[in-house]
Every structure is written in C-alpha cells, then in structure tokens.
Image (cartoon, rainbow, N blue to C red):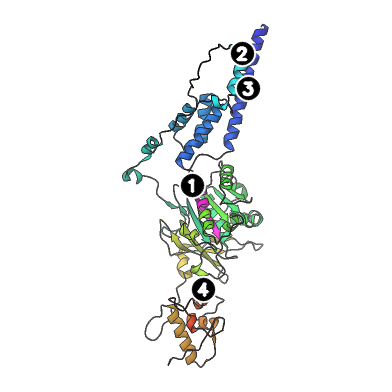
Amino acid sequence: MNNGDLAGDFNAGAAENSAVSRRAAAQSYLNGIPKPRPPMGRSMREAHCHTRARELAGYRFGLDEQTTCELLEKWAADFPPGEVKYFVHQAYLPIDFEEDDEEEAEPSASQATATVIQLRPQQQAQPQPLDRVALWKTQRRTPAEGATGTKPDYLDQRRPEGQRILPRSPSGCIAEWIGHWGHHKTGAAIAEACEAVALSRRVLIIALEDGDGVETLRLPPAAAHRGMTLEDLAGKLEVWREPFDITREQDRNDLIATFDDFDPDLIFIDVATLAIGDRSPSADVTGIAMTLGLNHLASAFKATVVALKHPPDSLTGTDMRALGSTLQGGLIYSTVLWMYDEKSATLRGHVAKAKNGPAGFDVFMRNQPAADGTPVIVDVPPEEWGKLTRKPVVTETADQPVDDLREKVVAALKAIYAAGNHKPISVPELVKQIAGCSEQTQAGKTLGNKIRRATKRSRRRKGSLADLTWPGGEYLFKPYDAKE
C-alpha cells in the first residue's frame, strides 16, 4: 500500500468520524431546545422547525439532507413527516451566485471539507416562504370528521360514571383543587397519583410546598396501601422540587424539555401559589398568566394538569374559591373543593365546576394514618357515600321556609328577643339559633362568615345586614322586637 492509499484511508476515516460527531452534536442540541408543539402558534412552529433545518444543514453542523431529515422528524414529531421533509428540502435548495470574471483555482479536498462544515450564513440556502394557507386547508375538517375524534373523558375510571373528578382531554386540560391547610389536598393528590400509576399512567408531582415530606413520608405508605413498592413507581411517577415560575415562558419551556422523555399523563402542582414568582396572586394579570401557563403545560404533554390552591381564610365549605384573582376559576376546566372532617376522618371533594361533565356532587375519601401517624388518604366505597353526604340546613318559620339570609337573620333575632334576650346579639348566637350548631362545625363556620360579610355591605345593596347591626359594634346585632 502506498502513501497515497494510506492518506485516502485516513481522510475517509476522519470524514466519517467528523460526520458521527456532528450528528451527535446536532442531536444533543435538539434535545436541549423546546419542541415545536402547541400552544406555540402554527406559524411560529413552522419558523422554529425551518430554522433548525437550516442550522443542521448549514454552517452550524453541516449535516447531509438524509441525516437532517431523520433528526428533525424525531424532534418535530407533531408535524406530519411530509411537512418536515419539505422544511429540510427548502434548507438544501441550491443558490445561484453571480459568477466572477476571474477563474478561481479549484480548492483542495481539505479546503472543500472545511467549506462544507463552516459555510457562512450569507451563503446558506434561503428557505422559500411556506404556503401556510395551503397547509391550513389540509387541516380543515367537516363536522362528521371532527366527531370521529377522541372524546374527553376522565382518568379516575374506578369511580362511578358521573361521579369522577379528574377530567382528561385529547389536547390536555387544566383543573384546580382548592382547600384550606390541613385538609389533605396533598394526600388526595398522592392517592390519585398512585391510582393513576396502577392504570399505567405516568404522573409528575411538582412539590413546591413540601417536597421532602412528599418523597420520604407520604408517598411510601400511600404506595404500600395499594400494594405497590417504590420500585414499581420507577418510570411511572416522579416528584420534582426545583423552584419554578409557571408564568415565565422560559421556565415552562425548560420544564417541558426536562420531562419530554417522561411525557406525563397527569401533573399535580402543589401549590400553585408558589409557582408565580414574586407576583401578587390578587392581580388579574397574574390569574390570566397562571392559567395560560397551566394550559401551556397541558397542551405540550397532552396531559391533565391539576393546580392545588388555598382559599382565603374567610371562605369555607362550598363558598371557597382560590386565593387571588377570580379569573383563575373562570378559565379553569374543572374545580374541586376539598373539606376535611376530623371527627369522622372523612375527606369530601365537592365538584363545583366541570366543563364536559356533571358538577355539584361529592366524592369521599378517608384518612387512614400509617403506623407512624403519617396521613394516608384512601377511597371510601361509593356505596357508603350516601351516608356521608351533607344535607343543607333549612330553618323554617311557622308559615313558610326561610330561603334568604336576611330573612333567616331577622327570624333568628325575633326568636332571641321573644326568649327574653334584649341585649346586643353576637354572630355565634345567630348561628346557633339559625343552624342549631356552633361555629366550630363546618356548616356553622360557613354561615357565620356569610353573616359577617353581609354586615359590611352597603345598606343600599341587596342582602345587606348593615341596618340590623348595633351602632359602633363589631358584628353585633340589635335586639329585634317582633312588634316593630
């Protein structure tokens, strides 16, 4: 073998190694950037994919057309393969350069290789503009075609039909769970996560409030109760604890890229208030940004995203709403209110809102603590729910039912006055008279808060109780003589 043969073999091997390394570098680069998928707009996705094709084809990596097409088809899986090939083909179109008058010497092999790898940006093939209208026309569907798509349903199939709480949609959807501290929202989320894993779903728990407790204390006994070991959860359930701002697009894109290989079906964010950075939850713009961020995650993974939230301290029972802007609830797919009764160790989930299903019903779970006292939330059999359903307390007069809060308060004040109490009357006394229970109970606390809010309304507003209160007294009511 002469020296020329040796040189040829060496150059061929070097070129092959260079192609392999450039392909690996391009693959690593694509893995580190967001994929072109909704809710990114269609035009932006096209531009995103087109730019990546130019980078792989041109000065940045210098790959051949076949390799570029293979990498992009895998990276841009949401695009039909034909469209990806179109993007790649555009990136490799030849360019007509003006011919120089002087003839240039033919470059050497090494110079040619360097030119391929290090093409200047201005020498790259400029992609032709896409005919977006033509692409959109292919995506139009008749009502009959649309009706053949996958219908929204629920993840918690173990519950009776019409009494399920975890919605699922082909394009992803968002839900909110609202409950006070200590009412076992986190425990319910862990329970639903384990039940979803049992149905071969992948679950991501973003534990921003108590990641250590979730991983070391709560998850092990919850899995054990359902006959699963922590090894059984590997590849199916992950807990993530890094700081995260859902209102920032870069944070969302990084999260999507981080868990792209995991591709969760169900995501819990515990709690959403810790995922908005230093923004005020009361600002309307924050409520909109939070909801848009949740929608971004849901669309990217085609998953159900559940945001756990706290209500204001003054709101309890079915009056609860998320702390902050009311726009949060208005833009949410489903809302579940969680209430815990310590006496019976029962957790009640009230479905206050459901976009594609029934609402206004309750589901029940129970706290069955582990040996060390760690809360473990388990299902209550549906056949026992009827015994646990709370019936609204209705106070009646001799003539007709009392439906309005003001009428209830007036009737209670008259009854207290008739019993001989002519002193200022407190809210707890009214609650006892109206509901027959103290404010230590859930129903009593809810009624008491309603009365207090009504006393602060303007006297001109409907339902105001301000004219019934004692002058200068904080939540004290005047005696009410039935003869007045």
Amino acid marked by disc 3: Asn
Secondary structure of residue under mark 2: loop
Amino acid residing under circle 1: Ser
Residue receiving disc 1: 299
Q: Look at mark 2 in the image and give the residue it sits on.
A: 108
For label 2, the crowd category at 10 Å Cα-Cα, with few meaning under 14, some 14 to 19 and many 20 or more, is few
Q: Are the two marked residues, 1 and 3, in contact with CB atoms closer than 8 angstroms?
A: no
- Residue 291 lies, in percent from the top left, at 51, 54
Q: Is residue 189 above or below residue 251?
A: below
Mark 2 or 4 closer to N-term? 2
Kind of residue at disc 4:
Thr
Of labels 3 and 2, the one closer to you? 2
Query: Looking at the image, is mark 2 or mark 4 nearer the viewer?
Result: 2
Q: The magenta stretch spans which residues? A: 292-313
Q: Is residue 76 visible?
A: no
Q: Which mark is residue 446?
A: 4
Between discs 1 and 3, the one toward the N terminus? 3
Which kind of residue does numbered mark 2 sit on?
Ser
Q: Kindly identify which residue carries mark 3.
A: 17
Residue at position x 47%, y 70% from top?
387
Q: Secondary structure at mark 1?
A: helix
Measured in 3D between alpha carbons, the distance from the residue under mark 2 to the one under mark 4, in whole angstroms, is: 86 Å
